[in-house]
Structures are given as structure tokens and as C-alpha cells.
Amino acid sequence: MQTLLLDLDGTLADTAPDMHAALCRLQTRHGVDPLPFEAVRDHVSHGSVALVRLGFPGIEGETFEDLKRQYLDLYAQALHVETRLFPGMAKILEGIEARGMNWGVVTNKPGWLTDPLLRAMGLYERAATVISGDTTPERKPHPLPLLQACREAGSTPQRCLYIGDALRDIQAGRAAGMVTLTALYGYIDADQTPDTWGADGCIRHPEEILPWLSPVHRAS
């Protein structure tokens, strides 16, 4: 195993507080009572479309598209206020680098949000590859973003481990021929059944990643 690839929202970083805050500001702007954090957190991995629909149910068409644009503008203005690496993730990244391996990010978040966020977190220059939702012609669950990340990292699919907290992450990883893990600590709502997604394993904490980089563990 040479390369660890990670989804961003809900896998690498806990972005929910800042994404929720942007939604609250949008709701307040339009005279809507802001949703509590607990009602929003587990929908963050589905992006701005899901969050705006959650905050403004029943709104469609151009009005919805305008709300989505406003939401993204608000989020971009404050995307690194409360966002942090998940506990234990910093240790994992350091351990990977110490082993002479590399790591990267594959997300459906657009690059104009992904890159500034990773730079603000001091991660962009450390990553061997950063693939955003608009980097390639296809987005997850298509395998193309993961295959592009694999090439940029100088690796092969068989030597990559991909971790995500959404079904599309596991579908993309499997289609790319990579070992996949579901991050149960991420943004998974009660209606989802991650045990049926077909991942090679599930983890409840980032520290559970390291054993999966061992050939002995994966063979078992």
C-alpha cells in the first residue's frame, strides 16, 4: 500500500460547523428560523444542494438556484472558522508521511472551495494530489476522479486505500479497483445503511486506518 486517498467533508475534516453556520446565515437573511446543528450535520456530505433543500423545503427552479449561489458565497466567506481535522487524523497523516507513503484528497466539493480550505488548514502543499468535483469531467461515484488522483500520486489502484463517508465514495473506490473503508464517524444519517455499501471495512475513528495499510491486515 502506497497511497491513502480521503474524501474531504466528513472523512478528513469536520467541516459541518462552518457549513451549518453558512446555512443559518442564509436562513436568517430570508426570515427563516435557522435549523439546529443536529438537524444539519449528517447531511453535509451531500453538499450545498442537500443543505439548501433542507433549509428551504419545497423551493425549486431559479429561486432554488439563487439560494444555492447565496449559500456558497456565504460559505466561501467563512470556510475555515470552526473546521478542523477529525481527532486523530493529524497523527494518521504524519504517520503516513513518516512511512514514506503519500496521501491525497478526492472530493466532490468544487475546487474554488476545496483549495482555499486545504491551504488554510496547512494541508494543500502536503497532499500528493487534490481532486475536486470539477477537476475531471466526472464526479464520484464515477471512478475517474480516483483514478486521476492515483496517477498524480504516482501510485496504482491496487496500492491505494480510499476512505469516505458516503455510498458514492465506496462505489467510486470499488469501481477504481481500490481497497475502500467507510468512515462511520462521518456524516451518515439514520436512513443510510453503510453496512450494505460493500466497503472492505468500516472504521469508527481515524486511528483505525493504520492497520489497513498493513498487508497482513488486508489479507485477513
Image: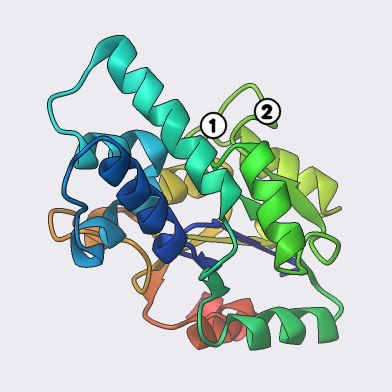
Query: Circle 2 is placed at which residue position?
Result: 136
Q: Considering only vertical position in the picture, is 184 above or below 214?
A: above
Marks 1/2: CA–CA distance:
7 Å
Residue found 50% across the figure and 47% down from its top: 75
Q: Is residue 159 visible?
A: yes
Residue 214, picture quadrant = bottom right
Lateral position of residue 205 relative to residue 207, left or right: left
Percent x, y of residue 132: 64, 40
Horizontal side of 158 relative to 208 (left or right) equals right
User: Decide: marks 1, 2 in contact (CB < 8 A)?
Assistant: yes
Q: Nearer the viewer, residue 77 or 196?
A: 77
**Quarter of the figure with residue 29:** top left
Q: Is residue 166 visible?
A: no
Determine the image quadrant of residue 70: top left
In the image, what residue type sits under mark 2? Thr
Name the foreground residue: 130 vs 35: 35
Residue 46 lies left or right of residue 108; in this view the side is: left
